[in-house]
Structures are given as structure tokens and as C-alpha cells.
């Protein structure tokens, strides 16, 4: 999947996903502006620019919550995995909404006099020891720089050239950006807004996100603890009937390795559950065109040898499986990435 | 000059160096570092410019390493 780069990795599903995303953003902005127009009339009226600043700012924060919720939701239930498919476009869109918010702020608050508008906005408050005069715009600015770096390095080129570890570390900074934005809103609102609506909604969002991450983490830990024993012996995985055609079943070994077992065309094969691209859960994908297809970004692997179909060159470890009676057994010793393993026949398929 | 102005000047300088480096790098260095870029549509390189400008010290080190590797 890495012999050529494309501008945007669009396919039919991703185009639908992006159209839905664009539609949802337009609906959100229109609804926000409409409700603001109703609430702020007469003496209460506020400038159109301020409404737009709030609409784009809150839109960016809402989207950031969605981005951060998708990971744990997908770990809690495979039903949410399709949302992972195009998470990077959500991230880039979050940055763009934040950028529009910041630009409008510069136009509205930094436009007068000969002063540099950026320094006028960032320098308006300068007391780091005060809650009511804290330079909260600086927090938003640093968060925007982080979101920029993440959006700018979201293409596959960056994963390939920065290396998975550095790239992941860089993209974990999204949590720092989130914390900065929470403080940006809380301190900003404390200085200018009487309504408690924003802090309350933000608190609810933070508690929901924190809760989702904790529950998903506990579930993962429980899965690992309950992992099948793998001390060199074949391990009993499940009944053949428990495997769905062209779908995977993820098996967690005591060694913490995860293996994906697939049933397809009357055969069974097992490969590592970890996608070479960004570690996506292959066992939650499907077999499409004869290949195990990662649910995250669509990398493909042949189930019988763990290799991406030519001209691609990715390889992942394979495992041996066998069937005894109606039970599926797995040899927990991983083969070298790309090692061919003869698939076993599904006895039920040969009977029918 | 206030602290904020110094901060902005430092970021501005970093960004200018980054943009200049990025333009040179996508034209002259990126294929050496990642041959897959050579087989890709040229427009793809435009997409890499903001990231290279943001991470230019990292990319500079990678470029030097890639050039060194080619000579040895
Ligand atoms: S993690 Fe991206 S395709 Fe698998």
C-alpha cells in the first residue's frame, strides 16, 4: 500500500463519510447562528462576527470530542469501527474550523490601530497568575499550532517517513491540545460570559470522554487477563460455528499478542491482528476480494500468508490453525511475517 | 519588545525557515528520502509542504542521513 501516494485516499465509503461530515457541519453552523439570532435580540444583540466566532469555535471543540471518542467507542464495540475509517479527515476538519475561528477573532479584535493583530489578540490579557485576566488566547493559539502539526502530518507519507513511534507520539499531542482548549474556553468564558452553559457542556464532554477512555481501557485489560494460555501448546479457541463467513475472530493470547482467525471459502487461516499501517484491528475487518481488509484505512493482506497483494509489500505474522472435531485450535507461536501457512479445511463446509 | 512579540517573532522566523526549506526539500530532497514520492503524482508534494515547514529540523536531519546513506 506504500508504493505510491495519492492526494486523498478517497473511495466510495470515504466520499459518503466526508459528505455526511460536511453536511453535519453546515447543519451545526446554521443551527448555532439561528439559535443565537433568536436568543440575542434587542439590548442583548451581539455582532454577527461574534456569533460566527462562537459558531466555528464551538464547532471545532464538538468535533474534537467526536475525534477523541471514536477510539474508545470502537474498542468497546465493533459497530463503531467504521467511524475509525476516516478519522484523519475529522482531525483535519477540526483544525480548519479552529483556523476560521482564530482568523475571525483576529479580524474582530485585532483590526484597529497599527498594531500587529496577532500580538494585539495574544497580548490583550497578560497575567498568568490571575483567573480573570489570564492570557487564554495564548492557550487557544498553542492548541491550534498542535492541531496544525497533526493535520499537516496526517498523510500516509508522514507515517512512513517519521516512523510509527514518533508519528504516534506526535499525534498523542491531541490530548495536550484538548486540555489547552478546555482551559481556553473555561478561562475565556469566565472573563466574558455570564451564562454557565459553555462550562457545563464542556464539563459534561470532558467527563464523557474520560469515562469512555477508562471503560475501554478496563475492557482491554480484562480481555488480556482472560487471554488464552499460550505456553507452546495449541490453544482451544472456539467452536467452528462461532466463526462467521468472511469475518474475523480476535483471540487474545496470554503473551498479550492478538491473533485474528478468519473463515472464508470453506477454509480457516490465522494472522496477526495488528495492521502494519497504524496497528488497526484486522480481526474486526472483513475479507474483501479474497483479502483481509483493515477496518481503519483499508490495507489488505492475504489470509494464507499475511502478505499484502502485489505490488504492495507489507507483511504480518501468520499462525497455524487446525480443527479437531468442531473445535478450532491455534498454535500460539507466531511465524515470521509473510510466512505462507496452508489454510485448514472447514469440516462443516466439506459436509455441505 | 514584549514577551508576546518575542514569542511571535521566534515562531515567525521558524515558519519562514520552514517554508523555504520545505520548498527546496519537496523539489530536491524528498525523493531521495522516500522513493515512493517519485512514483506519485507531483501534486501530492504540495500536500507535504505544511508538514515539512512545521517539522523542518526533523526533515533536515532525515535528508542529511538519506544523503549520507546514498554515498556510503
Ligand atoms: S491501520 Fe490503517 S489500514 Fe490498518
Image (cartoon, coloured by chain):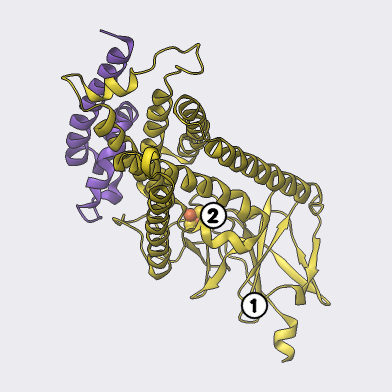
Chain colours: A yellow, B purple
Numbered disc 2: secondary structure: loop
Q: Residues within 10 Å of mark 1 (few under 14, many from 20)?
A: some
Numbered disc 1: secondary structure: loop
Q: For the N terminus of chain A, which image quadrant?
A: bottom left
Question: A233 or A62: which is nearer to us?
Answer: A62
Determine whether A127 is above or below A26 in the image.
above
Left or right of residue B57, residue A237 in this image: right
Using the image, name the chain to which the residue with label 1 belongs: A
Q: What separation in Å lies between label 1 and label 2 (alpha carbons)?
A: 20 Å
Q: Which residue is mark 2?
A: A275
Cβ at disc 2 under 8 Å from ligand 1: yes
Question: A162 or A73: which is nearer to us?
Answer: A73
Residue A110 seen in the figure: yes
Residue at the image point whose x is 71% and y is 54% from the top:
A333
Determine whether A46 is above or below B41 in the image.
above
**Contact (CB < 8 A) between labels 1 and 2?**
no
Q: Indicate which disc residue A26 carries.
A: none
Task: Please identify the quarter of the rendering in which residue A340 is found.
Answer: bottom right
Residue at the image point whose x is 62% and y is 53% from the top:
A73
Q: Seen from this angle, which residue lies furthest bottom?
A: A352
First in sequence: mark 1 vs mark 2: 1
Q: Which residue is mark 1?
A: A245
Residue A95 seen in the figure: no
Amino acid at each position: 500500500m506504500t508504493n505510491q501516494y495519492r492526494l486523498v485516499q478517497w473511495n466510495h465509503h470515504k466520499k459518503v463519510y466526508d459528505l455526511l461530515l460536511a453536511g453535519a457541519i453546515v447543519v451545526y453552523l446554521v443551527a448555532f447562528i439561528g439559535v443565537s439570532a433568536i436568543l440575542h435580540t434587542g439590548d442583548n444583540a451581539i455582532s454577527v462576527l461574534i456569533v460566527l466566532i462562537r459558531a466555528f469555535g464551538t464547532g471545532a471543540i464538538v468535533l474534537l470530542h467526536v475525534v477523541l471518542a471514536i477510539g474508545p467507542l470502537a474498542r468497546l464495540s465493533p459497530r463503531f469501527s467504521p467511524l475509525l475509517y476516516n478519522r484523519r479527515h475529522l482531525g483535519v476538519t477540526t483544525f480548519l474550523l479552529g483556523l476560521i475561528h482564530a482568523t475571525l477573532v483576529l479580524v474582530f479584535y485585532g483590526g484597529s490601530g497599527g498594531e500587529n493583530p496577532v500580538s494585539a489578540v495574544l497580548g490583550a490579557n497578560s497575567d498568568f497568575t490571575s483567573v480573570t485576566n489570564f492570557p487564554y488566547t495564548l492557550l487557544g493559539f498553542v492548541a491550534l499550532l498542535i492541531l496544525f502539526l497533526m493535520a499537516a502530518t496526517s498523510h500516509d507519507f508522514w507515517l512512513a517517513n517519521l516512523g510509527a513511534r514518533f508519528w504516534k507520539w506526535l499525534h498523542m499531542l491531541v490530548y495536550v491540545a484538548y486540555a489547552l482548549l478546555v482551559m481556553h474556553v473555561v478561562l475565556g468564558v469566565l472573563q466574558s460570559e455570564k451564562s454557565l452553559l459553555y462550562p457545563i457542556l464542556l464539563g459534561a464532554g470532558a467527563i464523557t470522554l474520560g469515562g469512555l477512555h477508562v471503560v475501554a481501557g478496563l475492557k482491554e485489560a480484562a480481555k488480556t487477563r482472560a487471554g488464552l494460555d499460550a505456553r507452546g501448546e495449541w490453544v482451544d479457541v472456539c467452536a467452528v460455528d462461532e466463526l462467521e463467513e468472511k469475518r474475523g475472530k480476535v483471540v487474545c493470547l496470554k503473551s498479550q499478542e492478538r491473533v485474528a482467525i478468519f473463515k472464508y471459502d470453506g477454509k480457516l487461516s490465522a494472522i496477526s491482528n495488528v495492521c502494519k499501517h497504524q496497528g488497526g484491528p484486522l480481526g474486526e475487518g472483513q475479507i474483501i476480494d479474497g483479502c483481509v481488509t483493515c477496518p481503519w484505512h483499508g490495507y489488505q493482506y492475504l489470509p494464507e500468508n499475511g502478505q499484502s497483494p502485489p505490488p504492495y509489500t507489507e507483511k504480518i505474522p501468520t499462525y497455524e490453525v487446525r480443527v479437531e472435531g468442531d473445535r478450532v485450535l491455534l498454535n500460539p507461536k507466531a511465524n515470521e511475517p509473510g510466512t505462507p501457512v496452508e489454510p485448514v479445511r472447514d469440516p462443516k463446509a466439506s459436509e455441505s | 519588545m514584549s514577551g508576546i512579540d518575542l514569542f511571535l517573532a521566534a515562531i515567525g522566523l521558524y515558519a519562514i525557515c520552514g517554508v523555504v526549506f520545505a520548498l527546496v526539500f519537496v523539489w530536491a530532497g524528498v525523493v531521495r528520502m522516500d522513493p515512493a514520492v517519485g512514483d506519485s503524482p507531483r501534486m501530492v508534494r504540495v500536500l507535504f509542504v505544511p508538514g515539512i515547514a512545521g517539522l523542518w529540523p526533523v526533515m533536515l536531519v532525515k535528508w542529511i542521513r538519506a544523503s549520507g546513506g546514498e554515498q556510503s
